[in-house]
Image (cartoon, rainbow, N blue to C red):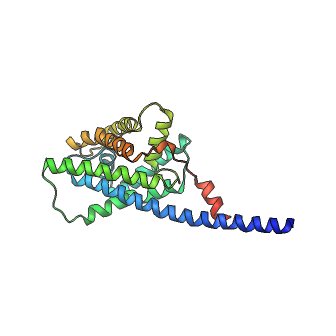
Amino acid sequence: MMFKDKAKYAQIRERAYRVSRKEIFRQWLQIAAGLLVFAFGVHLTIYANIGLAPWDCLGMGVARQTPLNYGLAMTIIAVAVLIVDLLLKERIGYGTVIDALLTGNFVQMFNSLNPLPENQSLVLGIVSMLIGFVFMALGMCVYMKAGQCCGPRDALLVGLGQRLPTVPIGAVQIGMWAAVLLFGWLLGGPVGVGTLIGTVGAGAVMQLVYTWIQFEPRNVKHRDVIEITRILRS
């Protein structure tokens, strides 16, 4: 009887692992989909042509100072931020790695495929940038909910947010983006009215979107690389 119970338990455990593996692969697709939505939002802020949001300003600044294109520059920046995350002892998951490898290249893809002429309208630029912030917030929500840790920049945001629990997450992002903007400007990244809108507006839009959909990034339970790898190997 005991043997049968152990055998039954082993079968249940094996089914649980099998479901977990399937769920992990589904989450990887969810992360990629969320990053695609996020990257489209970033593309809209670039298309706005009224000055880049801080991270994109930094990416363009690095691209101007090196032989790299925007996509590769953003990938290198993501890896550098990932190192900072590790120094802050933030949990690193497969979602973090996927974000670092895909986001900049997704944005580069949208920039290359864009069939529209360069925007010259300030009003259209502002509207485009604000819509871009909405897509960015939604994309972040989609891939964060996968629970395989945040992308490097968002891990930094959540890490800082956890160290400042009484400060709204949107306000934390505004402060972080202001620091990023300074580095981007020093490297010659494009700065304009859209940059100022982006520094303050992205955090404000994110706060509004997350309040509306009732999503709090700091409450998501994540599984890091070690946990996911253990399930995949079981």
User: What residue is rendered at 22% in x and 44% in y?
Assistant: 194
x then y, percent, for residue 139 = 38, 54
When the figure is inspected, residue 27 is found, relative to residue 181, above or below; the finding is below
Of residues 46 and 205, which is closer to you in this image? 205
Q: Is residue 180 left or right of residue 23?
A: left
Q: Is residue 88 left or right of residue 187?
A: right
User: Which image quadrant: the C terminus?
Assistant: bottom right
x then y, percent, for residue 212 = 36, 45
User: What residue is rendered at 33% in x and 58% in y?
Assistant: 107
Name, please, the residue furthest toward the top: 166
Of residues 212 and 184, which is closer to you in this image? 212
When the figure is inspected, residue 125 is found, relative to residue 203, above or below; the finding is below
Name, please, the residue furthest toward the front: 1
Observer able to see residue 64: no
User: How many marks on residues?
Assistant: 0
The answer to which image quadrant residue 12 occupies is bottom right
When the figure is inspected, residue 226 is found, relative to residue 53, above or below; the finding is below
Q: Is residue 125 left or right of residue 3?
A: left
User: Which image quadrant: the N terminus?
Assistant: bottom right
Of residues 159 and 54, which is closer to you in this image? 159
Name, please, the residue furthest toward the left: 121
Q: Is residue 229 left or right of residue 174?
A: right
x then y, percent, for residue 29 = 47, 64
Observer able to see residue 127: yes
Of residues 66 and 21, which is closer to you in this image? 21
x then y, percent, for residue 223 = 58, 52
User: What residue is rendered at 27% in x and 64% in y?
Assistant: 112
